[in-house]
């Protein structure tokens, strides 16, 4: 039966592992793009389109591929018209993870078992909106009802973290909402908006930034502030992994050039990025944070659509640069000083699965289990095949048992269904090992390993006490 309780669980061992061990484990969503303001204000929705399609560029890409006009995707079409456009697209999405996610979300959040299509769209629209109107469907309720114990948002260093501070003071919401330090703009010295961001950093840090030394002091002051609000993670998006031999003195001169509005070369840019990333790694190590490197997203490829509707609207794809050498040397910079922090490596291009799974092994140590992680299948890879490929590279070259598991990387409060999807795939994998007698038929041991991957490993890795 399609999408029944044993979906993706093809033998008795997989079913036992999922239902007895994985299913009810809490969630720590340690990387997402939820808006802390919406969580604090406990935003409510008028209809399913608002909670399901607004901001979801995964669905937008599929609708464009199905020939849907932009009016009914990001344009001024009505919410019902946009829902109908998605309903027309779903039957065409078989094989795409969106097909499975859509129906898991309908089941879990709306108690709807029908397979969505154009014919039943109006009925499902009415059923879903009745659930939303019941009053048990706000941002906080969706998080709590998904068994989420903690989540980490994604925040620019210049953010005042106002809503994180307010959420810490909330007595009626016990889910931890923690910031993540995301200093992408801090290394983009060649970007035309760098000087604007520099002014924002001066204001946020209350410092006059006249040189590179002051720049680093200002950045460290923001790490201090984030740490005081509960931050335990940093995150960097690297389309290109930079590495150029340099010195702090040389980078200081490059900073001065850029600050004066003078053009800098690509080599100078990479020198600035290399040393500044080294500074960040040393700082994170000092504070006991973990660092995430999201590698290989080539963003905003369609200039026409970028100019019309902006970034993060569904026009990104994996890059194909070679990363092994530069990533190795960049990590080694900090490792030589014993200042490499706990690090999670993600790739958007699956060609680099074995690069990252083995790179992690190069820098393990310090008595920290899984100090360097090969992170979960990310973005264009967070489907059944991509998750299996990521875990295969991990267990072939490292320790699957120490894996910190799944995250949503999403702006949607319904995306926690992806944790269920991942857990079913994980249990299917381990259950097949048991069936094939590749590992002992010790369900309790395998089940505890799965529970660790689902939740316990990441809690221990980040070091956040969370009440069960």
Image (cartoon, helix red, strand yellow):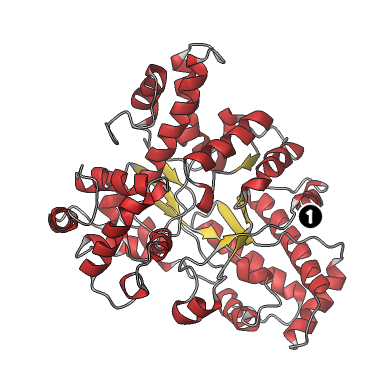
Q: In this view, does 384 lie to the left or right of 249?
A: left
Residue occupying image coordinates x 20% and y 63%: 47
The picture places residue 293, in percent across and down from the top left corner, at 63, 53
The picture places residue 105, in percent across and down from the top left corner, at 29, 47
Quarter of the figure that contains the N terminus: top left
Q: In this view, does 454 lie to the left or right of 265?
A: left
Q: Name the residue under label 1.
A: 326
Q: Viewer-proximal residue, 89 or 447?
A: 89
Q: Viewer-proximal residue, 398 or 210?
A: 398
Residue 42 seen:
no
**Mark 1 residue element:** helix
Residue occupying image coordinates x 49% and y 52%: 31
The picture places residue 461, in percent across and down from the top left corner, at 56, 39
Q: Viewer-proximal residue, 30 or 68?
A: 68
Residue occupying image coordinates x 13% and y 54%: 123
- Quadrant of the rendered structure where residue 20 is? top left
Residue 299 seen:
yes
Residue occupying image coordinates x 48% and y 68%: 312
């Amino acid at each position: 039966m399609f999408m029944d309780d044993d979906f993706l669980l093809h033998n008795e061992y997989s079913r036992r592992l999922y239902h007895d061990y994985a299913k009810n484990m809490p969630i720590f969503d340690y990387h997402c793009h939820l808006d802390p303001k919406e969580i604090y204000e406990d935003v409510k929705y008028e209809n399913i389109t608002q909670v399901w399609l607004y901001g979801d560029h995964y669905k937008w890409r599929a609708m464009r591929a199905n020939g849907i006009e932009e009016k009914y995707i990001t344009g001024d079409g009505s919410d019902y018209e946009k829902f109908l456009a998605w309903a027309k697209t779903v039957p065409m999405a078989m094989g795409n993870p969106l097909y499975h996610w859509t129906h898991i979300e309908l089941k879990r959040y709306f108690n709807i078992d029908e397979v969505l299509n154009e014919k039943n769209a109006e009925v499902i629209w009415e059923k879903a909106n009745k659930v939303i109107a019941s009053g048990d469907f706000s941002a906080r309720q969706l998080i709590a009802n998904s068994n989420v114990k903690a989540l980490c948002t994604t925040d620019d260093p210049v953010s005042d973290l106002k809503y994180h501070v307010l959420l810490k003071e909330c007595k009626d919401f016990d889910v931890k909402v923690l910031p993540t330090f995301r200093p992408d703009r801090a290394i983009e010295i060649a970007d035309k908006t760098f000087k604007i961001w520099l002014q924002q950093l001066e204001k946020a840090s209350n410092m006059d930034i006249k040189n590179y030394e002051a720049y680093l002091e200002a950045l460290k002051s923001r790490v201090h502030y984030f740490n005081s609000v509960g931050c335990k993670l940093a995150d960097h998006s690297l389309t290109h992994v930079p590495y150029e031999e340099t010195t702090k003195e040389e980078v200081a001169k490059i900073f001065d050039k850029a600050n004066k509005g003078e053009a800098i070369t690509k080599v100078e840019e990479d020198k600035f990025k290399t040393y500044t990333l080294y500074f960040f790694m040393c700082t994170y190590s000092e504070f006991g944070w973990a660092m995430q490197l999201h590698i290989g997203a080539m963003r905003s490829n369609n200039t026409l659509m970028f100019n019309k509707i902006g970034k993060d609207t569904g026009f990104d794809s994996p890059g194909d640069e070679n990363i092994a050498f530069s990533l190795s040397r960049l990590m080694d910079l900090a490792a030589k000083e014993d200042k490499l922090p706990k690090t999670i490596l993600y790739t958007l291009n699956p060609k680099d699965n074995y690069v990252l799974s083995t790179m992690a092994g190069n820098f393990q140590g310090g008595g920290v289990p899984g100090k360097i992680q090969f992170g979960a299948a990310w973005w264009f890879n967070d489907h059944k095949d991509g998750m299996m490929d990521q875990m295969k590279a991990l267990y072939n070259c490292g320790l699957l048992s120490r894996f910190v598991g799944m995250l949503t990387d999403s702006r949607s409060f319904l995306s926690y269904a992806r944790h269920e999807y991942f857990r079913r795939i994980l249990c299917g994998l381990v259950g097949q090992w048991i069936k094939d007698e590749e590992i002992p038929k010790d369900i309790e041991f395998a089940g505890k390993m799965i529970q660790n991957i689902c939740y316990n490993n990441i809690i221990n890795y980040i070091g956040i006490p969370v009440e069960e």
